[in-house]
Amino acid sequence: MKVGLIVMLLVLVAGLGYTLTRIWQILPFTNTIKGLLFVIPFMAIASIIIYGSGLIDKLPLNFASFVYELGTSWPMILLYLALIFGVLDIAKLAHILPETFLRKSIVGSASIFIFVTALFVYGNINYKKKVRMPITLTTQKQLPKAQKIVMISDVHLGYHNRKEEFKRWVQLINNEKPDLVLISGDIIDGNLRPLWEENMAQEFRNIKAPIYACLGNHEYIGGEQNSEKFYKDAGITLLRDSIATINRINIIGRDDRTNGHRKTLHELTKGIDKDLYTIVLDHQPYHLEQSEREGIDFQLSGHTHYGQVWPISWIEDLIYEKAYGPLTKGNTQYFVTSGIGIWGGKFRIGTQSEYLVAELSNR
């Protein structure tokens, strides 16, 4: 684990060095002006340190939000700049692109600036657009009536997803007039201070349906006890290795796999009425075969965000059996959602922010 972390840090440092070197070479300014411009990436690095060290909680709320956005957006911008310079360097080596395009070039600098700005404006607009994903679930198990269930994951309320934005998401949920709302973890981004100060718990209480949720790994970042208190204040029924039954539906909420001592799904399903339709909430989509083996009807997971931006989504596809979307294994249906919210910079490139609207009925 430590070796992997060291390798990742070395790759990040190498990528940062490569990108900043290429930016320095292409800018058509004096060294003094370029030095002044380079204050921006170093401010972003400082912002990441402030966020990671916890000092962000001591800043005024609005300024803390700015620090969070700056620090977590810059790595994504650097990723795309590294990809762009990589492609341009290959084009130069292949004699497709002249050397002058990459050296103190007004045209080169302007072209890259316009492209990256347009790309991230699009990414931000695309993030703010919440996509309604309808899914159909049918069962031979007896239901009292057809059920409409809104399912979300990865809300990530905190310094970047603030109260006013969350109000809009609540309205989207209420517009569906659901019988039930299920949340597959990561309601909290990590720092609970903005949630307390803006009384976001009250916004959850404005949702006009019972809410059931499991923990995600970010609830552990914020501290399980603090997270549990927020869930309680928000009127959310937390299922932490526990089961609830509503409208003849079993809902099993697994503790996040961050807890290495969480119960197995086999232990949780002992003694439940398997004649009832059974849904599992498990934040991280690992070992999906377990739900199939235990005869679960449907599993909702999140966590992956589907990488948030391409090409990270391709990496997610290599890590998980299913990094995004629907899946069927035997008689068990799954959906791994990319989430309604996001961690870090508010950009979706090649992915989407979504909420699921499931119609559950008898065949």
Image (tube, rainbow, N blue to C red):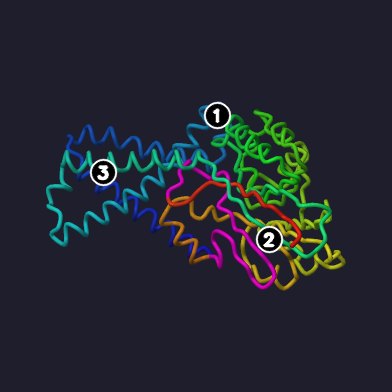
Where is 3 relative to 20, above or below?
A: below
Q: Residues within 10 Å of mark 1 (few under 14, many from 20)?
A: few
Residue 267 image point, x, y percent: 80, 67
Residue 331 image point, x, y percent: 69, 70
Please, what secondary structure does the residue beneath circle 2 have? strand
What residue span does the magenta drawing correspond to?
A: 320-349
Instruction: Give the mark nearer the N terminus: 1 vs 2.
Output: 1
Q: Pick the residue in front: 65 or 340.
A: 340
Instruction: Give the mark nearer the N terminus: 3 vs 2.
Output: 3
Where is 291 relative to 354, above or below?
A: below
Please, what secondary structure does the residue beneath circle 1 have? loop
At horizontal 49% and vertical 42% (from top left) the residue drawn is 127
Determine which of the numbered discs, if any, sits on residue 59 in the image: 1
Q: Please identify the quarter of the rendering in which residue 232 is found.
A: top right
Determine which of the numbered discs, if any, sits on residue 350 in the image: none
Q: Pick the residue in front: 76 or 167.
A: 167
Main SS category, magenta section:
loop
Amino acid on which disc 3 is placed: Ile
Please, what secondary structure does the residue beneath circle 3 have? helix
Residue 69 image point, x, y percent: 47, 37
Nearer to us: label 3 or label 1:
3
Residue pointed to by mark 2: 299
Nearer to us: label 1 or label 2:
2
Amino acid on which disc 2 is placed: Gln
What's the CA distance linking mark 1 and mark 2?
A: 40 Å
Where is 259 relative to 157, above or below?
A: below
What's the CA distance linking mark 3 and mark 1?
A: 34 Å
What's the CA distance linking mark 3 and mark 2?
A: 43 Å
Q: Please identify the quarter of the rendering in which residue 225 is found.
A: top right
Residue pointed to by mark 3: 112
Amino acid on which disc 1 is placed: Leu
At horizontal 83% and vertical 51% (from top left) the residue drawn is 247
